[in-house]
Image (cartoon, rainbow, N blue to C red):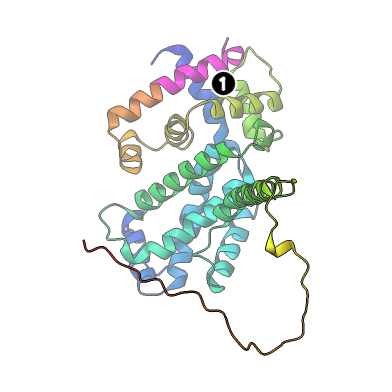
Amino acid sequence: MSSEPANESPADADDVLVARAQNGDTSAFDQLVVNYSPRLYGMIYHMTSNKEDANDLTQDVFAKAYQSLSRFRGRSSFYTWIYAIGTNMTLNFLKKRKRRAAWSLDNLDSGIQNDEAMVDLAHAANPRHQSDLNELQKKLNEAMQSLSNDHRAVVTMFDIQGIPHAEISKILKVSEGTVRSRLFYAHRQLQGHLEEFIK
Amino acid sequence: MNEPETQVQKLIRLKRFEEPRDGYFEDFLEEFRSRRDEGETSKGFLNSRVSGGRDNGKWFVGAGVAYAALLVVVLMWPNGPEAKPDASRQPIIFEPKQPVRNPVTPPKVPISIPSP
């Protein structure tokens, strides 16, 4: 339970939690896990398209952050710092996974077939094409996996998670121009893969 | 941004509705806590899984090298008529020990070491 004032900004609240965690308060770090695991898991899941990998990687990201917390100096926000750890670990993992012969697009997960919000939004996004949701999700996953890891990272953070360009540039340590350029090319590539759902 | 890109973005945004089951993040926190309590945060879940596969690959490479080395030894084993008999393959004959009366010592040859 947090004892921070209600008008504190999320970043300030994070600073307090980080300081407490650095002093050995494990419950403070637990609160950071609670605050950030949904977003980090989401980012990693959309990068890997595999629930098991996403779960294990997200655990590893928090483990790494916990181990490295003493070195966190607050030059960036905790959010940017842990996202940078998550992105780097995910990109490294994807490089290793690419070398695994057994992995294929068949390993892609699906799990929103019956999500009402998904049904409504799919229809709103594409009213002329009553596509099967399974097929749409499969195509979305395949389209995402067709992107390079760097392009998938910006699409995941910007289009799916709504992180601003400036924040993505800090997380990936690239310029905002590079973020915009990657998004442009990624959208063009995705358009080719999803043409049947756009027309 | 032109129209087709907007449509692409709308489609991709649908992925934000892919969420894990209810209660997943509570279980996630419990899993993290138990790892921390057991001091296992320094060990990676995924790295062990991914590198586990790679270790298997190393095992196969090691086995292959060992097999190749064994093959070389077998092929090079002297078994032809011109092959020099190998002392290690001769039968071992045990003879009773007898005292040596006049042991033969090799003649001493002076060795000259050239000065550099």
Identify the residue under disc 1. Answer: A125
Q: Residue at x 54, y 28 (%)?
A: A144
Image side of residue A189 versus residue B19, left or right: left
Residue B20 appears in the rendering: no
Residue B57 lies, in percent from the top left, at 62, 47
Work out whether A43 lies above or below B14: below
Residue A156 appears in the rendering: yes
Work out whether A31 lies above or below B5: below
Q: Residue at x 31, y 59 (%)?
A: A12
Q: Main secondary structure of the magenta part?
A: helix
Q: Tell me which amino acid carries mark 1.
A: Ala
Chain bearing tag 1 is A
Q: Residues within 10 Å of mark 1 (few under 14, many from 20)?
A: many
Q: Residue at x 65, y 31 (%)?
A: A105
Image side of residue B33 versus residue A104, left or right: left
Q: Residue furthest top?
A: A199
- Circle 1 — which element? helix
- Residue range corresponding to the magenta coloring: A185-199
Image side of residue A94 versus residue A103, left or right: left
